[in-house]
Image (cartoon, rainbow, N blue to C red):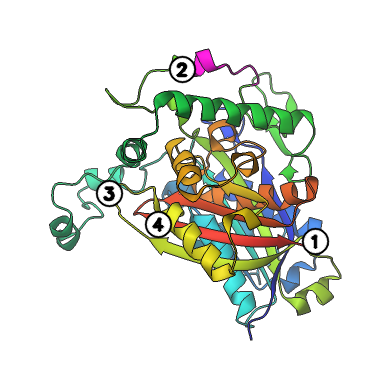
Amino acid sequence: MAEAAYIVAACRTAGGRRGSRLKDWHAADLAARVLDDVVARAKADPHLIEDVIMGCVSQAGEQSTNIARNAVLSSSLPESVPATSVDRQCGSSQQALHFAAQAIMSGTMDCVIAAGVESMTRVPMGAAVKPAYEAGFGLPYGKGMQQRYPKVQFSQFTGAEMMAKKYDLAKEVLDQFALESHQKAKQAVEKGWFKNEIVPVEITLEDDSKQMHEVDEGIRMDATLEGISGVKLLAEGGRLTAATSSQICDGASAVMVVSEAGLKALGVEPLARIHTLTVVGGDPVIMLEAPIEGTRRALEKAGKKIDDIDLFEVNEAFASVPVAWLQELGADRDRLNVHGGAIALGHPLGGSGTKLMATLVHALATHNKKWGLQTMCEGGGLANVTIVERL
């Protein structure tokens, strides 16, 4: 019988826009900040931590050479804490959470931290591909893949437009969804709903004064449908714009997962139990629709129906993804991304998986709900799905 896996602490930084409030933070130091915080929240003896598993997509430059281990060595954790880095594209830190939970459920470990980080300012998207290609080191797609998908240029932007067309999602519907993301995020800030999950981070302003960064920078408090609707299309004849896409973002997040023995050793009450773990692969060309089938499989595995789930976190990589997900699964729109999503809050790639889980477990507590489901689309046509039960 599998061990139960419990979430005992979860936190994230507030998102920073590209080139803005978090631009001076090296990714290893930013990740170290959430590692220290999640340990402090659990009041854990750091010597009890058996592994750190960290998601990061652009593992180049400052984020290369095992960013997870470098984050541990940048933190207050002892050198004895090992760490490894994971790349499942946008789902990297959700996969880190799955690996952590699997280590607990297998009985091989009692306390693991799953985390994620991405400084999209300091290590831009494509940093692991373009410079290597220009240096003569080739592209990630070998002959076998090219033969299987001839003349295909794999692109999340193309996939997002394909989603909008396949599921017949009008631009007006996508614009309205984007507006609601900002409105929900604004309400969450004003009501203080993010305070329990956000780790304040010290930043230096242009006048050299210090300030704590603790509000997601991407939220447009004055967003209007007219303003969103007027943004230029990403592609001629398309339906998506920058306003209906996730914001490029710097950020980090962490979740501590423990066993029953870990609960006793830490002397802490759990926030939630990890109930179901699922990962699926789908069409890598349209790329972004795997969360639909992944959710169906996860619900079947859990013995649940969509209406049994109280809150959903579906990553807003592009508005077409969660809107298609809602449409195909018949889910209650009022339960989706209740504190806003990546369109307003930002999407720090490898940091988003545990970021969404931090938001989900705290939102379940804020709204006195029991069941939560998290999923996100991932490059290569992948999707992770996680179902948790608040305790």
* Alpha carbon distance from label 3 to label 4: 11 Å
Disc with the residue nearer the chain's start (3 vs 4): 3
Q: Name the residue furthest bottom.
A: 1
Judging depth in this view, the residue of 366 and 144 nearest the camera is 366
Would residue 369 be visible to someone looking at this image? yes
Query: Tag on residue 229?
Result: 2
Mark 3–mark 2 contact, CB under 8 Å?
A: no
Count of number-bearing discs? 4
The residue that mark 4 highlights is 382
Start-end of magenta stretch = 221-229
Q: Is residue 240 magenta?
A: no
Q: Quadrant of residue 194?
A: top right
Circle 1: residue type:
Ala
Query: Tag on residue 288?
Result: none
Judging depth in this view, the residue of 336 and 17 nearest the camera is 336
Q: Residue at x 65, y 21 (%)?
A: 221
The residue that mark 1 highlights is 42
Mark 4–mark 1 contact, CB under 8 Å?
A: no
Image vertical order of residue 150 relative to residue 213, above or below:
below
Q: Label 4, secondary structure: give it.
A: strand
Image vertical order of residue 342 relative to residue 281, above or below:
above
**Which marked residue is nearer to the observer: mark 1 or mark 3?**
3
* Alpha carbon distance from label 4 to label 1: 32 Å
Q: Residue at x 42, y 63 (%)?
A: 280
The quarter of the rendered structure image containing the N terminus is bottom right
Q: Residue at x 13, y 51 (%)?
A: 150
Disc with the residue nearer the chain's start (3 vs 2): 2
Mark 2–mark 4 contact, CB under 8 Å?
A: no
The residue that mark 3 highlights is 285
Circle 3: residue type:
Val
Judging depth in this view, the residue of 19 and 113 nearest the camera is 113
Circle 4: residue type:
Leu
